[in-house]
Amino acid sequence: MHTHKKISNMWLATLLLAAAGAITVGCGTKQQSARNDQTQLSPVSETQPKFEPLPRTAPVTLSARFAPSIGDCGPKYANGLRGACINNRPCRGIGIYDSGGKAACACYAREGGCSENERCDAIKKSCVPEKEPGFGRAPED
């Protein structure tokens, strides 16, 4: 039994040494890898920056209140939705109250609403081509 205990202790010591060696090798590899990464980085970009003009922002509409669509004269869009009916006239947009308090057609910042081939998109808050699908959907065939 005494010999069996010595063999077990030697086996345990061998395992511990092997594990310590594996950890040491792994740490050395990580340190070498970190040094390699630092030498490959450059704090200066190799490409020139692209300067582009900023897009024009829409004019601010102060306290625009929505006017209800009354009647069924609103244009029918290709996607099945309808525009508004403001002052008994078709409106490719929404109704708002103008500065004089009268109902007027608009598509957010565009007075008068959208053109004949456009519709007012509530997500983009602007006029979009009428055939453009809404809500990120694919176009219908």
Image (cartoon, rainbow, N blue to C red):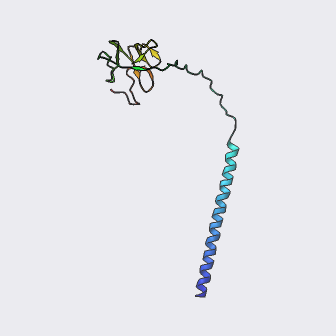
Q: Position of residue 107 (x, y in %)?
A: 43, 18
**Left or right: 56 with respect to 77?**
right
Question: Is 63 rendered above or below residue 5?
Answer: above
Q: Residue at x 45, y 25 (%)?
A: 124
Residue projecting furthest to the bottom: 1
Please state which of residues 21 and 85 is positioned toward the viewer in this rendering.
Answer: 85
Question: Is 44 rendered above or below residue 84?
Answer: below
Looking at the figure, which quarter contains the N terminus? bottom right
**Left or right: 44 with respect to 113?**
right
Q: Position of residue 4 (x, y in %)?
A: 58, 84
Residue projecting furthest to the left: 72
Q: Position of residue 113 (x, y in %)?
A: 41, 15
Please state which of residues 123 and 28 is positioned toward the viewer in this rendering.
Answer: 123
Looking at the figure, which quarter contains the C terminus? top left
Q: Residue at x 39, y 27 (%)?
A: 134
**Left or right: 136 with respect to 38?**
left
**Left or right: 12 with respect to 98?**
right
Quadrant housing residue 129: top left
Q: Residue at x 62, y 79 (%)?
A: 9
Question: Is 119 rendered above or below residue 27?
Answer: above
Please state which of residues 79 and 27 is positioned toward the viewer in this rendering.
Answer: 79
Q: Residue at x 52, y 19 (%)?
A: 60
Please state which of residues 103 and 90 is positioned toward the viewer in this rendering.
Answer: 103
Q: Position of residue 52 (x, y in %)?
A: 60, 22
